[in-house]
Amino acid sequence: MSYPINGFHDFHTILANERKIGGVIEAEQIQLRSGETFSFPVFTNIDYTGSTFYSLGFISFDGVRMIVNVNDISSIKAPMHKKVSEIHNPNYREMKITEKVNYLRRLYKADQGAFTRPFVQEATLIIEDIGIENVKNDLNIDFLEVKSNKVVRIA
């Protein structure tokens, strides 16, 4: 799924539609004008007014949460849209997997075994995003048919 990111508009589109498309934005490195560099940052927020982007939030490999003005960014190296299970940042990966498993658990409870089309689509997206191995331990997934780590059928 790794797709390159071409600019702040791509950042905004992916972050705003996270629930519909899944995944996160991770870069190899971000360097600030002060000279500080952060490896494998995962971008969590981008703020804008009108058509002007003014701040960017991210979590570094070390778990440091930062919000920086876009004018303070010197470079962002190789930003990519990736599945949660594919990112290198261990702090954010664990946080996001826990969040999505809890959401999937609530979604499964609300659907009450009816397996409606919206449930199947959303559950499939979540499971493929965080990886089937992260769901097997936490949920009863007898309703899934999986081949090559892809959800083939639900129910």
Image (cartoon, helix red, strand yellow):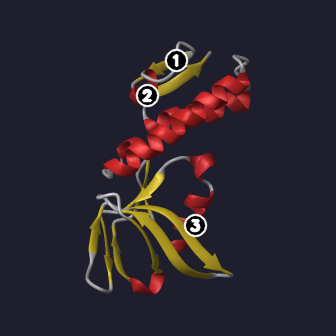
* 11 or 63, nearer to the observer: 63
Asked whether the beta carbons under mark 2 and mark 1 sit within 8 Å of each other, the answer is: yes
Residue at the spot of label 2: 132
Circle 3 sits on which residue?
12
Residue in the picture at 42% in, 22% down:
137
Mark 3 Cα within 10 Å, few/some/many (few <14, many 20+)? some
What residue did someone put label 1 on? 141
Q: CA distance from mark 2 to mark 1?
A: 9 Å
Q: Position of residue 54 (x, y in %)?
A: 55, 81
Vertical placement of residue 15 versus 69, above or below: above
Q: Residue at x 68, y 30 (%)?
A: 119
Q: Is residue 19 left or right of residue 57?
A: right
Spatial separation of the CA atoms under disc 2 and disc 3:
28 Å
Mark 2, Cα crowd under 10 Å, few <14 / some 14-19 / many 20+, is many
- Locate the C terminus by quadrant: top right
In which image quadrant can residue 125 be found? top right
Determine the secondary structure under disc 2.
Answer: helix
Q: Is residue 38 visible?
A: yes
Seen in the picture, residue 35 relative to 81 is either above or below; the reply is: below
Give the percent coordinates (x, y) of residue 99.
Answer: 52, 41
Q: Identify the residue at image location x=72%, y=26%.
A: 110
The residue at the far front in this view is 64
The answer, for residue 6, to whether it is visible in the render is: no
Q: Position of residue 82 (x, y in %)?
A: 42, 51
Indicate which label's residue lies in the foreground, 1 or 3. 1
Q: Amino acid at mark 1?
A: Ile
The front one of 117 and 67 is: 67
The circle drawn on residue 75 is none
